[in-house]
Amino acid sequence: MSEDVGGDDRRRHGRLSAWLQWLAPIAVGAVLLGAWEWLVRAYDIPKYMLPSPSDICEKFSAETHALGQAWWVTMQTMLLALAAAVVLGVAAAALFASSRLVSVSLFPYAIVLQVTPLVAVAPFIVLWIGWERLWLTQAVCAWIVAFFPILSNTVIGLDSADRGLRDLFQLYGATRWQRLRWLLAPSALPYFLAGLRISANLALVGAIVAEFVIGPQADRQGLATVILVSQLSQDAPMMFAALALVSLTGIVTYFGVHGLSYMLLRRWHETGRKE
Amino acid sequence: MSGTLVELVNVGKRFANGTLALDGFTGTIGASEFVALLGPSGCGKSTVLRLIAGLTSPSHGSVHRAWDGERKAKRRAAPPVGCVFQEPTLMPWASVWNNVYLPRRLQGMCRRDAAGEVDEALARVGLSGFANAFPRELSGGMKMRASIARALVTRPQLLLLDEPFAALDEITRSRLNDDVLALWREHRWSALFITHSVFEAVYLSTRVLVMSPRPGRVVDEIAVDLAEPRMAATRTSSRYVELCGRVSQALERAAADAAEVSHV
């Protein structure tokens, strides 16, 4: 009873990679920003055409409060849309997995949501929901974009459960709920998390595009409004500062979901492996 | 069916794609018997196992199981059967303990009530020290042991083993053969062991059923009267060699007959 277990070399190699994983993108970023700064200064490019990173930083520190407020408005829309995408995407996937007939009947309509251009339908969504609830309109628009990857990935995940384990659950007379709870849901988890990784940033993009399409509001000004207003007033550093905030949010969100995946999968799934 | 746990009578199985996997399969498994089902790849051995486990139904013929009446009375009651598949089929997201607990969990037993049985099953296969490990932290042989512990945790009347050691190296395979035999000697459940290894079939079983190529049916039945307990020396005994020879000849005859029929 003394067969081989585990492998330390792999873990040591994983730690080395972790350092590189942090350092490499920071180094690339520093080089790119340095080149950008040099280019703007060397060729004396005017601010309205391309502000330098130092101009953007200056603007960032001068307008921290305004940018922070706008960021929080966008985040609220994004988080609401993402939460709805998770709840409805997982519920719809479970429904699809429960019956082949339901799945083949409804899946084409789920694809409609994915391919519908947001720009085309947003005005109608405003009309349907009403001008007094534009925040909800924005969230619905962002949800439309974020919903499909979660649905699609979770459906694939629920279908990916090991055939042998399915047999085993059948042999021991598992109920539908037991099958879903103890077999299908854990099997689908890695797929769901991969979908979440895509959807989280799509929800961010959706929240910004929705605000662009619906237009600025007096009481809820998100990052898209900041970008629009700064474009109109030719305040390029402010626009770039807002864009930088969007990019940073995207990166943090991506790695946040990545961290969540690692936490949930590291003990048992290949995607949780750090190699 | 006195003393007989399972009886298949003239069973045929045709799949949805038209493949006829079994045709006229007749065979029995008696109480405390260790039956080896031997045949070439694709002859329908696993289909026989699935029929006995109730995972699929015959296209014609009948499958009688000693526990069928009891199950009809108690709807959704799991059969007193344990299954070990070709792959360990462990839940990778669950610890070894939780994997072994699975059958009891599905029968609605809480962890506290099942703990004794789970710990005992793990001890029987020598995995007590790995209860909290995850499947990917185990070697192939240990995974298969966990799979056997899971099959035994419900104290089944019949253990179905579908080429469980086919993917393992020779040393691990031989050791697991001895471990399964030791468990069987101790508890005397019935077993159906599917294999395409003549040597494994003879070493483990009390009776070998030899199947024809597809569509599979039993073409020969050979009683194995090797002395107990079986051990490394058994593999070099003249009786073992003689029985292996007989079983090999039966397999060759079955293949030759099938080839003749297909030429006609």
Image: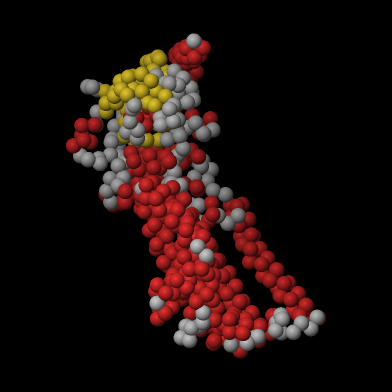
The quarter in which the C terminus of chain A is drawn is: bottom right
- Residue A235 in percent (x, y) is at 64, 86
In the visual, does B6 lie left or right of B219?
left
Residue B8, relative to residue B88: is it above or below? above
What coloring was used for the rendering? Answer: secondary structure
- Taking B106 as reference, is A264 above or below it? below
Q: Residue furthest left?
A: B73
**Is residue B31 at least partly visible in the picture?**
no
Q: Position of residue B26 (x, y in %)?
A: 33, 19
Instruction: Please indicate whether residue B154 sits to the left or right of residue B15 in the image.
Output: left
Q: In percent of the image, x 54 and y 33: which residue is there?
A: B169
A31 or A146, nearer to the observer: A146
Query: In front here: B194 or B68?
Result: B68
Q: Is residue B8 above or below residue A176?
A: above
Q: In the rendered image, which quarter is residue A228 located in?
A: bottom right
Label count reads 0
Nearest the viewer among B228 and B23 is B23
Q: Is residue A250 visible?
A: yes
Residue B123: image quadrant is top left
Q: Position of residue B175 (x, y in %)?
A: 47, 31
Residue in the image at 31% along x and 45% along y: A174
Q: Nearer the viewer, residue A256 or A157?
A: A157
Residue at image location 30% in from the left, 37% down from the top: B155
Query: Farthest residue toward the right?
Result: A42
Instruction: Give residue B97's position: percent from left, percent from top.
Output: 38, 48
